[in-house]
């Protein structure tokens, strides 16, 4: 057994994928007990030609801790045992925490071992006292910079980051994604090479292998990986900023895009009818909203303005925040420094990549470049008010925090929320 990870958790379901050693059938064993006693079984399924087994657990109880393992060829492999917690009920008050970060695999002038990471930060996130429901990975899961249409290269990247240099079940990234469900999008380094766009030759292979290997929420398009899900009364929307992206050298205007027309139409449909009583939006993307380099939204300014208009028209601007990464720093803006929508922006990076230099464009203070960095987003929902706290972390130490509070009257009116505050911890 190898490469076992879990994702796409909901109040009643979870999706486990992993590689097995033969074509023998696989069942998923799920129990509320860590010793897997009195389990439920799901399957059997036949592994793919790449020996990947993919099993969904259904009919689970909301807001409940579960443990799991694969049973392969009639043997339960407890060496690769994992765990997850189902979500609180959709549309109901549901306080929760998610973790988020980007970028693991670069060093000055090159890359970490095999361009993947085994940094201790993955253990810190896995054992975090806030017990995040999800690990949201915002891109650059690895730094292989694959620039050819070669599925085997993408498969090898996933294999290596989950088992790291032969460490198998004890590899830190694999342990994290086996015990904390992953929700991931890609950025350039793990899509098609540095600053890559829709024209990357690697695009077909990246799309194919993501669908083969990564547990994910439903994908609305055959050629992109944008997706959305809900937790309690919060809507999470994860953008794909690479699959339809124009070359940054193109002249800015209505035809220059980072998301593409299909993704924007899908986004508007989700924002208009999320399918549950969503009161708050978390928008996740890999590219910097407030950056100034050629790989940021500043080079796609016309579309950025279009998206702000959409978010305003659908009533989300006063009830949202954004999680992003790409640049290898922590940064927080309360919204007053964000000239494009005035919503809070949390930039949580890097897990393990060459630190970026300091900038002062965020209203909470200078950015913090470094490794072993990530963020948490805590949603406190008591059924009346909804408070959202984003915190940047450097290993076990909080760096800076920001809280926005949405009152019941604000949520009902969809008016701008009360003033936010920023705390240096």
Image (spheres, rainbow, N blue to C red):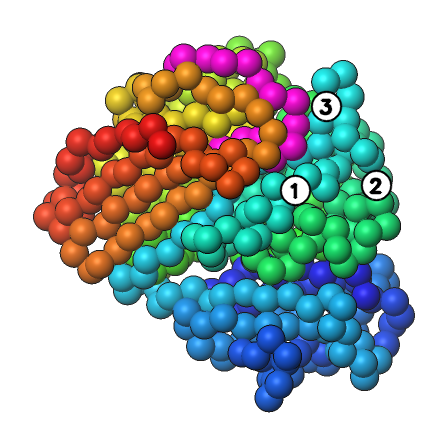
Q: Which residue is mark 3?
A: 107
Spatial CA distance of label 3 from label 1 is 16 Å
Q: Is residue 297 above or below residue 243?
A: above
Most foreground residue, 111 or 50: 111
Marked residue nearer the N-terminal end (3 or 1):
3
Q: Position of residue 139 (x, y in %)?
A: 60, 36
Q: Which residues are magenta?
A: 348-361
Residue 373 shows in the view? yes
Q: How many marks?
A: 3
Q: Which residue is mark 2?
A: 153
Please identify the quarter of the rendering in which residue 50 is found: bottom right
Where disc 2 sits, the SS reads helix
Identify the residue at image location x=68%, y=48%.
173
Query: Outermost residue, right direction?
Result: 22
Residue 372 location, quadrant: top right
Q: Is residue 278 left or right of residue 198?
A: left
Q: Residue 167 in the image: x percent, y percent?
A: 82, 52
Q: CA distance from mark 2 to mark 1?
A: 26 Å
Q: Residue under label 1, please give it.
A: 120
Query: Relative to 152, does residue 342 appear above or below in the rendering?
Result: above
Crowd around label 3: few <14 · some 14–19 · many ≥20 (10 Å): some
Tell me whether circle 2 and circle 1 mark residues in contact (CB < 8 Å). no
As for residue 242 lying within the magenta part, the answer is no
- Left or right: residue 291 versus residue 332 is right
Q: Is residue 11 visible?
A: no
């Amino acid at each position: 057994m190898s490469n076992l990870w879990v994702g796409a958790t909901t109040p009643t379901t979870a999706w486990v994928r992993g590689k097995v050693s033969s074509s023998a059938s696989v069942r998923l064993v799920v129990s509320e007990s860590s010793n897997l006693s009195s389990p439920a079984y799901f399957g059997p399924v036949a592994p793919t030609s790449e020996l990947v087994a993919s099993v969904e657990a259904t009919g689970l109880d909301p807001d409940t801790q579960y443990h799991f393992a694969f049973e392969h060829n009639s043997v339960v492999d407890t060496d690769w045992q994992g765990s997850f917690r189902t979500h609180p009920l959709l549309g109901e008050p549901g306080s929760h925490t998610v973790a988020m970060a980007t970028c693991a695999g670069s060093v000055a002038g090159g890359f970490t071992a095999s361009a993947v990471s085994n940094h201790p930060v993955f253990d810190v996130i896995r054992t975090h006292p806030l017990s995040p429901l999800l690990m949201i990975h915002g891109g650059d899961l690895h730094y292989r910079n694959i620039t050819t249409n070669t599925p085997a290269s993408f498969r090898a990247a996933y294999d290596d980051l989950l088992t790291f240099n032969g460490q198998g079940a004890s590899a830190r990234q694999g342990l994290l994604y086996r015990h904390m469900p992953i929700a991931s999008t890609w950025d350039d380094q793990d899509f098609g090479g540095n600053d890559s766009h829709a024209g990357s030759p690697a695009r077909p292979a990246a799309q194919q292998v993501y669908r083969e290997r990564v547990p994910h929420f439903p994908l609305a398009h055959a050629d992109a990986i944008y997706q959305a899900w809900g937790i309690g009364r919060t809507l999470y929307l994860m953008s794909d900023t690479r699959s339809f992206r124009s070359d940054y050298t193109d002249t800015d205007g209505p035809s220059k895009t980072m998301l593409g027309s299909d993704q924007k139409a899908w986004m508007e449909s989700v924002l208009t009818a999320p399918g549950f009583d969503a009161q708050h939006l978390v928008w996740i993307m890999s590219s910097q909203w407030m950056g100034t380099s050629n790989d940021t939204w500043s080079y796609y300014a016309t579309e950025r303005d279009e998206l702000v208009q959409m978010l305003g028209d659908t009533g989300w601007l006063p009830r949202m925040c954004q999680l992003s990464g790409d640049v290898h720093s922590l940064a927080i803006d309360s919204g007053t420094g964000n000239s494009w929508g005035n919503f809070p922006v949390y930039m949580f990076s890097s897990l393990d990549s060459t630190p970026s230099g300091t900038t002062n464009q965020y209203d909470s203070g200078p950015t913090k470049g470094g490794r072993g960095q990530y963020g948490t987003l805590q949603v406190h929902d008591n059924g009346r008010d909804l408070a959202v706290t984003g915190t940047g972390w450097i290993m076990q130490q909080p760096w800076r925090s920001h809280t926005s509070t949405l009152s019941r009257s604000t949520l009902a009116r969809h008016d701008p929320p009360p003033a936010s505050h920023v705390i240096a911890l």
